[in-house]
Image (cartoon, helix red, strand yellow):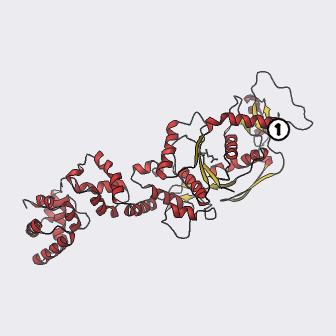
Amino acid sequence: MTVRTRFAPSPTGFLHLGGARTALYSWAYARHHGGQFILRIEDTDLERSTPEAVQAILDGMKWLGLEHDEGPFYQMKRMDRYREVIGQMLQEGTAYYCYCTPEELNAMRERQKAAGESPRYDGTWRPEPGKTLPPAPEGVNPVVRFRNPAEGDVTWNDRVKGEITISNSQLDDLIIARSDGTPTYNFCVVVDDWDMGITHVIRGDDHVNNTPRQINILKALKAPVPEYAHLPMILGDDGEKLSKRHGAVSVMEYPAAGYLPEAMLNYLARLGWSHGDDEIFSMKQFCEWFDFDHLSSSAAQFNTEKLNWLNNHYIREADNARLAALVRPQLEKMGVKLESGPALEDVIALMKDRVNTLNELANASLMFYREPDPDPELLKQHLTEAARTALKAYAANVETIEWQREALSAMMKALLKENRMKMPQVAMPLRLLLTGQLHTPSIDAVVCLFGRETVLSRLKGL
Ligand code: GLU
């Protein structure tokens, strides 16, 4: 059997983190088994589906690199097929026309509520052996209902939640086509999973209630029933359902906030699945390891600190040229003149260890491209007479020294010794004069990167 999985988002908003994790697991499961991953856009909710949301989903998948092998298939383009299957079911008697008007259904619900029963369709138009149905009323467009089995149970072995059994007595006859002929949500999912040969349905556990209905329809169609894995939801760091309140919930807010896709993928992979104590792994490794056995059955908590930690790791690992290409547009947008300072790649090489995001990296790089503007108070405090004398000597050495970090470091040490000073007494005012800041990486590295001319010009007039 070839494994075929799918990601089937409804394009009613951005691609959120939960959706991205579902997509990742479906993709990884297919890759693990050398199978296929299918992208299906469930766009039948015309009021809530938008082309922008479709684009946001495609963009999110592309950013994450979750390539599909087939699709995207759009449900709105498959209407003829759904109608065909409805026709077939009507003919076979696994579905039937129901002429109940909305008023009648309301009255039915009220009656049941008054009698303390849970509201359900009472089977008025359900054909039964020996039952005579009323004549079809004129002028009423019927809905089509699925003839759910009256007896027995539906059982499936959920790959996350374990065995789940629902009694058919709890399931009433689902409407599969509305009175205007349009097919309903659960029905489209069933026909698609069947036609697309889906073997494993991996989705959020908000769909658990749909599963017994979908299994019954699949069985009525004599279609194979896929395996189901329902993933628990993702909570915010405070244990509440993840929402805007917790920060970015849309995947595409993350590239904008300076996250690398490999950090997000690694983070999402571990959010509800584990492989021993392994925290950092590539997607190749993840696809090799991923299975259902290590999926967590309890809700996962989103933890921004951990994502930041992973992002820091992947930024440190990333090629400097790639990082420069990502950071350059941001700096240009801030009006930074990159020609006025050292090569961005070299700045990035020096600064990348200390940041969690590319935005922080852009901000940390700024000092190499801006005229320093040290706080006069700080300057007064750090630029003591002794420091001034030492820095004058430093500047004189800078004129002729071989431009190399080790040489600069040796020169600084000799200078400190000669002047009987400690490193911070010279390095702090030097930092202020060069960058306007007190916190920078090692002063020798910073000096080396600025270059002889810039250093001399900033130490002029001491
Ligand atoms: N379209 C559904 C959603 O976005 C998913 C349906 C499914 O995976 O079966 O929640």
**Disc 1 crowd, CA 10 A, few/some/many (<14, 14-19, 20+):** few
- Quadrant including the C terminus: bottom left
Q: How many marks?
A: 1
Where is mark 1, residue-wise?
Answer: 92
Q: Residue at x 73, y 46 (%)?
A: 213
Q: Residue 371's spot in the image, x, y percent?
A: 18, 53
The part of the image, by quadrant, that contains residue 403 is bottom left
Q: Is residue 314 left or right of residue 24?
A: left
Q: Residue 159's spot in the image, x, y percent?
A: 67, 59
Would you place residue 291 above or below residue 4 in this image?
below
Q: Residue at x 82, y 26 (%)?
A: 136
The part of the image, by quadrant, that contains residue 405 is bottom left
What secondary structure is marked by label 1? helix
Q: Is residue 362 left or right of residue 162?
A: left
Q: Residue 393's spot in the image, x, y percent?
A: 8, 69
Q: Amino acid at mark 1?
A: Glu
Would you place residue 51 above or below residue 373 in this image?
above
- Quadrant including the N terminus: bottom right
Q: Is residue 437 left or right of residue 160?
A: left
Q: Furthest residue to the top?
A: 138
